[in-house]
Image (cartoon, rainbow, N blue to C red):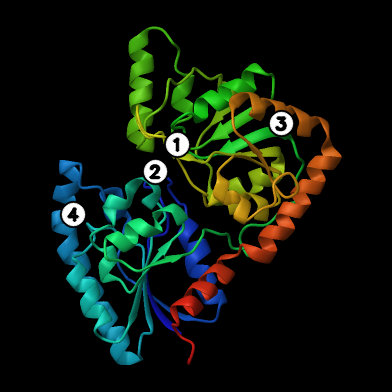
């Protein structure tokens, strides 16, 4: 198929140099043999200002959206005239363009798809534009009905990893436990529990280094926590102070993949939003849940029921549901390397067999009935 691809390279503005989506979505489409025409427009600023709750974001997108819309229509039309485009593949928010723009492209005989992976707690950011697309690729099974109620056509497409990028490295396993991801929610308290249990753990990503701020004077801690909130974009729940030995900065994509081979135990957390004072926490399967096993990690994940559709617990990955259980299982598997190695290898084999982006996207197109005659 001939695909017009309008997706940014990285999921968060603070991840300088990351090419997560390019290495996963774009590369997988190319690997499948499709001809991919890239949208020549820098989307970084649009992703950083996608949430209209901020006046600054609204002002930014007021100027950026007309430029984006005009460039998208112009480039898709030109590419389509040169040789027919079969699919428009986007990662767009409501703020990126008006639904009418997507509908116009669809009227040219082009099947339109939008990939989005934050609907678990930010569905409102795509609820207006989703109905304009022929298909919304949705990795959160529990949000499918929300898309339908909004008038969209959701297609369940769980996250995955690209084995051409995510693979084991032959490096010493010189770390007991490691986590790669933002410092928000209850994550710092889980890391603190491991520290208190004398498990050598280190967390890398946005916001962790600010948690080394001393508890007094209080203003310094408040400023540090405010910086975490601004950087990560989500709040912390009663954050603890962490020792410098337990935190690190943001890793490059390559450093993260190597970290999965360096750590004896790689950690994963499933809560993406605490839900507030009266609502239950929101959990979802994450991109990391496939990247880590495919990279050869022994993966110890905060339990979310949907993960059982993708991995066999205690044979391919291991889960925990509380801080005490995390400490217990981390200690156990650090002390039992043979069991840890067997689970690590089984998880890697399962990821390679069933959880590649190439497989996910091929299945999605087939289910949508797109490109079957080309």
Q: Earlier in the sequence, mark 1 or mark 3?
A: 1
Q: Is residue 154 left or right of residue 332?
A: left
| Residue occupying image coordinates x 35% and y 69% | 153
Reading the image, the residue beneath label 1 is: 206
Relative vertical location of residue 286 with respect to residue 364 in this rendering, above or below: above
Reading the image, the residue beneath label 4 is: 61
Q: Earlier in the sequence, mark 4 or mark 2?
A: 2
* Corner quadrant of residue 54: top left
Q: Earlier in the sequence, mark 4 or mark 1?
A: 4
Q: Earlier in the sequence, mark 3 or mark 4?
A: 4
Whether residues under marks 1 and 2 lie with C-beta atoms below 8 angstroms apart, the answer is yes
* Corner quadrant of residue 197: top right
SS assignment at label 4: helix
- Look at the image and tell me whether residue 179 can be seen: yes
SS assignment at label 3: helix
Q: Nearer the viewer, mark 2 or mark 3?
A: 3
Reading the image, the residue beneath label 3 is: 329
The Cα atoms of the two marked residues, 1 and 3, are separated by: 26 Å
Relative vertical location of residue 244 with respect to residue 369 in this rendering, above or below: above
| Residue occupying image coordinates x 83% and y 34% | 336
Relative vertical location of residue 293 with respect to residue 235 in this rendering, above or below: below
The Cα atoms of the two marked residues, 4 and 1, are separated by: 25 Å
Camera-side residue: 286 or 71? Answer: 286
């Amino acid at each position: 198929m001939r695909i017009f691809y309008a997706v940014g390279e990285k999921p968060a503005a603070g991840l300088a140099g990351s090419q997560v989506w390019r290495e996963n979505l774009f590369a997988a489409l190319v690997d499948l043999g499709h001809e991919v025409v890239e949208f020549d427009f820098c989307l970084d600023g649009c992703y950083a200002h996608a949430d209209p709750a901020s006046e600054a974001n609204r002002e930014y997108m007021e100027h950026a959206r007309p430029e984006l819309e005009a460039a998208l229509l112009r480039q898709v039309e030109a590419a389509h005239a040169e040789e027919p485009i079969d699919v428009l593949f986007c990662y767009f928010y409501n703020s990126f363009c008006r639904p009418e723009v997507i509908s116009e492209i669809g009227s040219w005989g082009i099947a339109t798809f939008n990939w989005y992976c934050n609907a678990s707690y930010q569905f409102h950011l795509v609820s207006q534009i989703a109905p304009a697309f022929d298909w919304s690729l949705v990795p959160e099974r529990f949000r499918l009905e929300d898309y339908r109620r909004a008038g969209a056509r959701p297609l369940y497409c769980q996250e995955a990893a690209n084995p051409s990028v995510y693979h084991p490295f032959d490096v010493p396993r010189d770390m007991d436990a490691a986590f790669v991801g933002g410092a928000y929610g209850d994550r710092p308290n889980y890391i603190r529990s491991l520290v208190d249990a004398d498990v050598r753990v280190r967390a890398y990503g946005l916001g962790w280094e600010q948690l080394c701020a001393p508890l007094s004077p209080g203003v310094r801690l408040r400023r540090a926590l405010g910086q975490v909130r601004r950087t990560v974009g989500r709040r912390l729940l009663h954050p603890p102070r962490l020792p410098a030995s337990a935190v690190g900065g943001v890793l490059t994509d390559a450093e993260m993949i190597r970290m999965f081979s360096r750590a004896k135990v790689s950690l994963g957390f499933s809560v993406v939003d605490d839900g507030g004072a009266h609502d239950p926490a929101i959990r979802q399967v994450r991109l990391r849940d496939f990247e880590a096993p495919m990279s050869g990690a022994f993966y110890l994940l905060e339990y979310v029921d949907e993960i059982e559709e993708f991995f066999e617990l205690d044979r391919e990955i291991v889960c925990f549901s509380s801080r005490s259980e995390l400490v217990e299982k981390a200690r156990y598997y650090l002390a039992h390397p043979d069991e840890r190695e067997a689970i690590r290898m089984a998880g890697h084999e399962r990821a390679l067999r069933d959880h590649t982006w190439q497989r996910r996207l091929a299945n999605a197109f087939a289910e949508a009935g797109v490109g079957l005659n080309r």
